[in-house]
Amino acid sequence: MSEIKTIGVVGAGTMGNGIAQLAAQSGAQVIMRDIKDEFVERGLKSIDKFLSKGVERGKVTPEQKAEVLGRIKGTTDMADLAPVDFIIEAVIEDLALKKSVYGELDEVCRPEVILATNTSSMSVTLIAAATKRPQQVVGMHFFNPAQIMRLVEVIRGYATSDETVAVTAALAQKMGKETVEVKVDSPGFIVNRLMIPHMVEAARMLQEGVATREDIDKAIKLGLNYPMGPFELMDFTGIDICKFVADYFALELNKEMKWDVPTNMKNQVRAGHLGRKSGKGWYDYSK
Ligand SMILES: NC(=O)c1ccc[n+]([C@@H]2O[C@H](COP(=O)([O-])OP(=O)(O)OC[C@H]3O[C@@H](n4cnc5c(N)ncnc54)[C@H](O)[C@@H]3O)[C@@H](O)[C@H]2O)c1
């Protein structure tokens, strides 16, 4: 496989713009594609803001900021991705949408180009099936915020080749990340498969009156040395996202009761109390 000089990032949202920034910081030229000019602009603005904060804190020079921004080109035209050497896809978590995007990418990109998905839960194998190059489709799961979190999970789909896994891990490492390989394409990969049950169990304990949410958070932070307790983390991630993933595990992984979301968690989602993003979740963020 030839050197990766240009990276295509598909989706300019929360994850896409963070990944585009990382890729540009690692020295690559980046083409970031979203469906509307306003979404591309929003993504570019978000990168600018992140880098400006770095300049204020003295971590980035104004010249470095200008260089990184100069390497990122925004577009709404899929055809502009034709020259890229590697694709990282970060469109919304919707399987039908992802499949149609992969069908298009398969047409536009050169046959040797690897298509990496940042999906947090979906089957890499199913996404790969929408292409004629399943051996070159792989999971490349960054964490939020992508510029800061140190891990990338590299997920092997059913047909992913050894070379694809190796090239993807090397690229993530070049971006400054530590990698782990997920050898079997299974729901939640490593991190979410372990994280979601502890969130569901925390909600169940609260519902049973075992302890207050403050004490459950305190116990996990001080007893396990985690930086956030499960309720704080759910509010940060979005309670709706946690519920969506737990429901997906119940369907895909096994039928065990442990995935059954307790009523208090369902009610938070029904009431629109989704965590920090809605101003209220397990805790109140309105003030
Ligand atoms: N947010 C997180 O904490 C997080 C963490 C890890 C992985 N992920 C995964 O990353 C992916 C993106 O999540 P996000 O949080 O950035 O979502 P987001 O909603 O912030 O961004 C998604 C972007 O994709 C764009 N999009 C939709 N259709 C498109 C298309 N056909 N071509 C190009 N762009 C298109 C949307 O306009 C939007 O800007 C999802 O698969 C998600 O599961 C999210």
Image (spheres, helix red, strand yellow):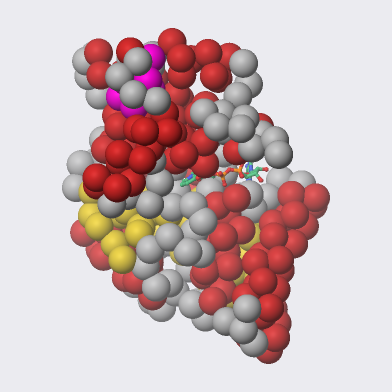
Give the residue at x 53% y 48%: 90
Q: Main secondary structure of the magenta part?
A: helix
Residue 273 belongs to the span the image colors magenta = no
Q: Does residue 200 appear in this view?
A: no
| In the foreground, 285 or 199 | 285
| In the foreground, 4 or 147 | 147
- Give the left or right position of residue 12, taking residue 239 as reference: right
Give the residue at x 55% y 20%: 269
Give the residue at x 38% y 52%: 227
Residue furthest to the right: 38
Quadrant of res 77: bottom right
Give the residue at x 68% y 78%: 56
* Residue 167 vertical position relative to residue 28 in the rendered view, above or below: above
Q: Position of residue 112 (x, y in %)?
A: 40, 62
Quadrant of res 17: bottom right
Q: Does residue 58 appear in this view?
A: yes
| In the foreground, 21 or 273 | 273
Q: Position of residue 259 (x, y in %)?
A: 30, 20
* Residue 276 vertical position relative to residue 83 in the rendered view, above or below: above
Numbered range of the magenta stretch: 200-207
* Residue 224 vertical position relative to residue 286 in the rendered view, above or below: below
- Give the left or right position of residue 198, taking residue 77 as reference: left
| In the foreground, 204 or 98 | 204
* Residue 207 vertical position relative to residue 131 in the rendered view, above or below: above
